[in-house]
Image: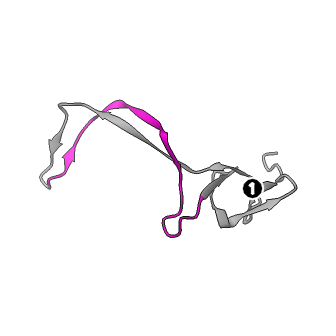
């Protein structure tokens, strides 16, 4: 079966994922503002924790979120399944 966004007909191409990482901080570059908030500076890179990957779900009901070929977020309930492949809209 093929999956498409039932609102637009666009092909579903993937799942929306959350992946954690650590943006390294410069050790001696912390300051505290007058309101108590801490500011800092980053070293410039981020170490990704690829094993932390998890599919994003809607906060209200836990419904899984997918992505279509246009990059739009599509709730699982807004996906239709069909025997025919989605029309290629890139041409």
Q: Is residue 14 magenta?
A: no
Furthest residue in direction bottom, as rendered: 60
Furthest residue in direction front, as rendered: 51
Percent position of residue 14, x then y: 66, 48
Residue at (53%, 55%) from the top-left corner?
A: 56
Percent position of residue 88, x then y: 82, 49
Residue at (12%, 52%) from the top-left corner?
A: 34
Viewer-nearest residue: 71 or 65? 65
Q: From the viewer's perspective, is 88 left or right of 33?
A: right
Does 34 appear above or below 76?
above
* Quarter placement of the N terminus: bottom right
| Magenta segment | 36-64
Residue at (53%, 65%) from the top-left corner?
A: 62
Q: Residues within 10 Å of mark 1 (few under 14, many from 20)?
A: many
Residue at (78%, 46%) from the top-left corner?
A: 90
Q: From the viewer's perspective, is 22 left or right of 39?
A: right
Percent position of residue 71, x then y: 63, 51
Quadrant of residue 28 within the rendered picture: top left
Furthest residue in direction right, as rendered: 84
Does 54 appear above or below 57?
above
* Quarter placement of the C terminus: top right
Q: Is residue 39 magenta?
A: yes
Q: According to the image, label 1 marks what residue?
A: 10
């Amino acid at each position: 079966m093929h999956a498409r966004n039932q609102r637009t007909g666009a092909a579903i191409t993937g799942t929306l994922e959350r992946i954690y990482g650590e943006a390294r901080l410069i050790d001696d570059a912390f300051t505290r503002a007058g309101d108590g908030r801490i500011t800092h500076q980053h070293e410039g890179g981020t170490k990704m924790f690829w094993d932390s990957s998890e599919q994003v779900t809607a906060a209200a009901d836990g419904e899984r979120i997918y992505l279509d070929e246009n990059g739009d977020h599509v709730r699982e309930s807004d996906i239709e399944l069909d025997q025919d492949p989605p029309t290629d809209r890139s041409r």
